[in-house]
Image: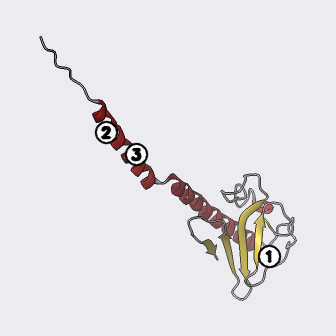
Amino acid sequence: MNKKHQGFTLIEILLVIGIIVLLAGAIIVAINPGRQFAKARNTQRVTDVNAILSSIVQVMTDNQGRWSCSGSTYYATSLPVTTATIVTITETDTTQINLSCVTPNYVPRVPIDPSLPTDSSNTGYTLIYATSTGRITVCAPNAELGETICTQR
């Protein structure tokens, strides 16, 4: 009685494993998790920039066009910066645009760039006020993937 052995040879198993490894590698490259995370952080930056700009405009609207954050050097004045001057937006620094007064009435928390530690007093965002046009621009200078994230009113 001859028994026929059924099964796979070592070569066949190694070939299948090799094909699976190649396919998995191609899928990981196509998905590119680093790029996906960078896109997610940029999406958060767009949301934050819009929230900051809206809260600044609301504070100024409620105070006849004046910035009224009492912890800021610029309290009770027009926005302080001249054309093409960039000012850092912070949560607590009184020498910059201080957003401590916008919470919780205008935004639930002061937005902080996703690349910074969550306890940072610097938000990672900047403000430009053009005196000639009165336009306020808030930007995210830490944007990734070569994107420019700015919004203005």
16 and 124: which one is in front? 16
Q: Is residue 17 above or below residue 4?
A: below
> What residue is at 77 percent from the left and 73 percent from the top?
87
> What residue is at 33 percent from the left and 43 percent from the top?
19
Q: Quadrant of the N terminus?
A: top left
* Extreme residue toward the left, this view: 1
Give amino acid for label 1.
Arg
7 and 101: which one is in front? 7
Q: Please, what secondary structure does the residue beneath circle 3 have?
A: helix
At label 3, counting other C-alpha atoms closer than 10 Å, the crowd grade (few under 14, some 14-19, many 20 or more) is few
Numbered badge on residue 15: 2
Give x and y (percent) for residue 139. Answer: 66, 71
Give amino acid for label 3.
Ala
Give amino acid for label 2.
Leu
Q: Nearer the viewer, mark 1 or mark 2?
A: 2
Q: Please, what secondary structure does the residue beneath circle 2 have?
A: helix
Determine which residue is flagged by label 3: 24
